[in-house]
Amino acid sequence: MNRLAGRVGNALLWVASIAGVACITLVLLSTLFHVTLIMFKTGSMSPTIPTGSLAVVREIPASEIKIGDVVTVDRDGALPVTHRVTSVNGSGEGRQITMRGDANPVDDPTPYDVTSVRLVVASVPQLAYTVVWMSNPLVLGSIAIAAGLLVTWSFWPHGDKAVPREAPQLNPAFGRPPGVQL
């Protein structure tokens, strides 16, 4: 039973270390390539991107926006909006774009003046719900406690007793082990 517990513990430590390396790698990649995640809380982009989807977005300059792109635009005093681009006007650094959600019958009420947007690269349906659940302080605290207990358990002495070494036999004539000369 002790041996099985040791194997399970080692497997869990490997999983935790791989997850840690993956997290560090993802943070570095997101910083280097200006990649972030967004969650879809409404169905305005359904059925292409349904409510509860998690999307990977990459920041691009306005000069790279194309009609048909799904982009996220920041709005003053309101949450960002993610819709499909229906027109692009302007030149230079800035552009004026109109957008529409795939589920909406008409374009958004006003065009957006942008110098950069976040382009949706990929999305995964329903994954936002998992991210929200994992963000719960009780879940995060439980994961932290479990990881701490796993590390503590792995370094804790497990009662493996060292095999005692045999004491050397003394040479009765000289009071020292055989083969030892002065």
Image (tube, rainbow, N blue to C red):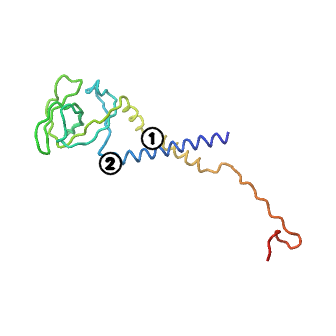
Which quarter of the figure has residue 167? bottom right
Residue drawn 46% across the image and 46% down it: 20
In the displayed structure image, the side of residue 170 where residue 16 appears, left or right: left
> Residue 109's quadrant in the figure?
top left
Closest to the observer, 16 or 158: 16
Q: Is residue 55 left or right of residue 100?
A: right
Disc on res. 31: 2
Q: Depth-wise, is mark 1 or mark 2 nearer the camera?
A: 2
Q: Secondary structure at mark 1?
A: helix
Q: Which residue is mark 1?
A: 140
Q: Amino acid at mark 1?
A: Leu
Q: Nearer the viewer, residue 93 or 74?
A: 93
Left/right placement of residue 50 relative to residue 141 reads left
Residue type beneath disc 2:
Thr
The residue under the point 66% across, 48% down is: 158
Question: Which residue is depicted at the point 71% across and 54% down?
Answer: 162
Residue 153 location, x and y as percent?
59, 47
